[in-house]
Amino acid sequence: MKDAIALLKQDHANVKALFQEFEDLGDRAFASKKKLADKICLELTKHATAEEEIFYPAVRAADKESEDLVDEATVEHSSAKDLIAQIGEMDPHDELFDAKVKVLGEYINHHVKEEEGEMFPKAKQAGLDLQAMAREIEARKDEIDFVPPRAPGLSPAPSLGRAPGTR
């Protein structure tokens, strides 16, 4: 069985491949784009939830020097989750659909570099039980089968049209 870090790295590689697949689709491949974007969003939701509930708290508890890294990663997840929710509410014909998926991919690339370059090595050094954690992460990911809607009270994505009553 893979340890938690190998498992999370595999998730990173899988999602990176999905983003590449999305990039390679033609401009008119709307149904394929929607299906792939939905898959990307679900995979990221599973991964982020497992990290936030299992991996991050363990890293934070084991290594006080990693607190800032965990805080930054949590904020990055929050931004990504907002974009994921926006993409989920959109139609692939919408003007900004492709742009939002592309920006999400860029966010994730940045996030992955920091996790794999800084947080994962610290987690390895911290002496965590990464085998047991891998089992917990897998089990948690298996429980998630949908992307939650945006929280009420968050304003919808801004419209690019004119405000009502203006010319």
Image: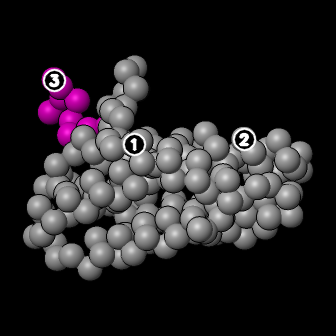
Which amino acid type is shown beneath numbered disc 3?
Answer: Gly
Q: Is residue 79 visible?
A: no
Q: Helix, strand or loop at disc 2?
A: helix
Magenta residue span: 158-167
Image quadrant where residue 99 sits: bottom left
Image spot of residue 151 (x, y percent): 40, 26
Query: Quadrant where the C terminus lies?
Result: top left
Where is mark 3, residue-wise? 165
Badge number at residue 136: none
Disc 3 or 1, which lies upstream in sequence?
Answer: 1
The kind of secondary structure element at disc 3 is loop
Circle 1: residue type:
Ile
Q: Position of residue 119 (x, y in %)?
A: 75, 60
Asked if 36 appears above or below 73 in the picture, the reply is below
| Label annotation for residue 57 | 2
- Quarter holding the N terminus? bottom right
Q: Is residue 159 magenta-colored?
A: yes
Q: Quadrant of residue 88?
A: top left
Which numbered marker is on residue 144?
Answer: 1
Could you say which is closer to the camera, residue 5 or residue 130? 130
Point 51% across, 53% down: residue:
138
Could you tell me residue 136's position as x and y percent?
Answer: 59, 48
Q: Distance between the residues labelled 1 and 2?
A: 19 Å
Residue 1, visible in the rendered structure:
yes
As shown in the figure, which amino acid type bears the numbered disc 2?
Answer: Pro
The crowd level at tag 2 (other Cα within 10 Å; few <14, some 14-19, many 20+) is: few
Residue 56 drawn in magenta = no
Label 1 or label 2, whichever comes before in sequence order: 2
* Residue sitting nearer the eye, 60 or 88: 60
CA gap between label 3 and label 1 equals 43 Å
**Residue occupying image coordinates x 25% and y 63%:** 36
